[in-house]
């Protein structure tokens, strides 16, 4: 198992523990068109930096945030297949763009267009990940929410978590192949 696969599995377990203590609301949070949510993590996905916009929108203090797994803000409506794809792309040393529904500390949610990039030191060693999140278009959120709901349904309908992830990953891949688009092309077509 690679470090990225191990990180994915570890963050899944941490996220489940966190979500057991948070009651989800149906309240959506927003941030300004000219604002960026910025965070940095170490190679294992632990937050090393979060800007004031991150802290405000997520409803977290710096003390709660620094050192926490980035999955602390992962909303349970997000399909695991999207995060698997994200880790796969990052594991290849490439950047990725994705629409993400995040979870605020009080159970509210907020949508972002995330741009995640690996960070390297001057010797070419991975030092972590940097993510900038912008306000997504409402049209894109509407379209991606329907797809994510379908993928989550596939994950939940499977008898085992691993099978659910495999099935939703296959469904996402099939959708992209039908449209003859990469994931990034798909994201920018919305």
Image (cartoon, rainbow, N blue to C red):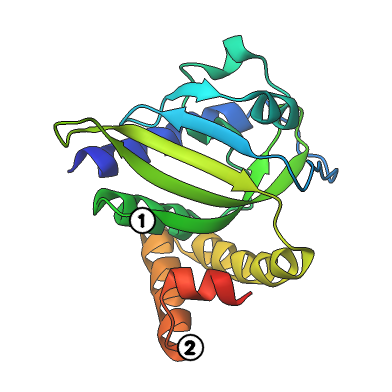
Measured as percent of width and height from the top left, residue 126 is found at: 23, 35
Q: Quadrant of the C terminus?
A: bottom right
CA gap between label 2 and label 1 equals: 26 Å
Helix, strand or loop under label 1: helix
Q: Is residue 89 left or right of residue 171?
A: left
Residue at 44% over, 52% down:
83
Q: Nearer the observer, disc 2 or disc 1?
A: 2
The residue under label 2 is 179
The residue under label 1 is 162
What is the quadrant of residue 166 in the picture? Answer: bottom left
Could you classify mark 2 by the number of other residues whose Cα lies within 10 Å: few (under 14), some (14-19), or many (20 or more)?
Answer: few
Instruction: Out of 158 and 172, give the one closest to the viewer.
Output: 172
Q: Quadrant of the N terminus?
A: top left
Disc sitting over residue 130 in the figure: none
Measured as percent of width and height from the top left, residue 140 is found at: 69, 68
What is the quadrant of residue 51 in the picture? Answer: top right
Instruction: Out of 110 and 7, give the one closest to the viewer.
Output: 110
Instruction: Find the residue positioned furthest to the right.
Output: 27
Measured as percent of width and height from the top left, residue 159 is found at: 44, 61
Measured as percent of width and height from the top left, residue 47 is found at: 46, 24
Could you classify mark 1 by the number of other residues whose Cα lies within 10 Å: few (under 14), some (14-19), or many (20 or more)?
Answer: few
Helix, strand or loop under label 2: helix
Up/down of 11 relative to 21, above or below: below
What is the quadrant of residue 8 in the picture? Answer: top left
Instruction: Find the residue positioned furthest to the left.
Output: 123
**Mark count:** 2
Disc 2 + disc 1, Cβ < 8 Å: no
Residue at 81% over, 43% down:
30
Q: Is residue 161 left or right of residue 26?
A: left
């Amino acid at each position: 198992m690679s470090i990225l696969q191990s990180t994915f599995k570890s963050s899944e377990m941490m996220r489940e523990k966190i979500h057991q203590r948070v009651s989800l609301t149906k309240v959506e949070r927003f941030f300004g068109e000219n604002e960026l949510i910025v965070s940095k993590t170490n190679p294992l996905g632990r937050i090393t930096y979060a800007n004031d916009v991150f802290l405000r929108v997520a409803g977290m203090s710096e003390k709660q945030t620094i050192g926490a797994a980035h999955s602390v803000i992962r909303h349970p409506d997000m399909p695991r297949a999207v995060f698997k794809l994200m880790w796969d792309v990052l594991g290849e040393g490439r950047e990725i763009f994705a629409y993400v529904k995040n979870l605020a500390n009080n159970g509210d949610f907020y949508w972002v267009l995330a741009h995640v990039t690996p960070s390297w030191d001057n010797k070419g060693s991975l030092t972590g990940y940097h993510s900038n999140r912008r306000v997504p278009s409402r049209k894109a959120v509407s379209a991606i929410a329907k797809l994510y709901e379908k993928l989550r349904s596939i994950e939940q309908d499977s008898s085992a978590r691993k099978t659910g992830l495999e099935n939703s990953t296959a469904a996402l891949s099939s959708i992209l192949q039908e449209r003859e688009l990469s994931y990034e092309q798909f994201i920018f077509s919305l």
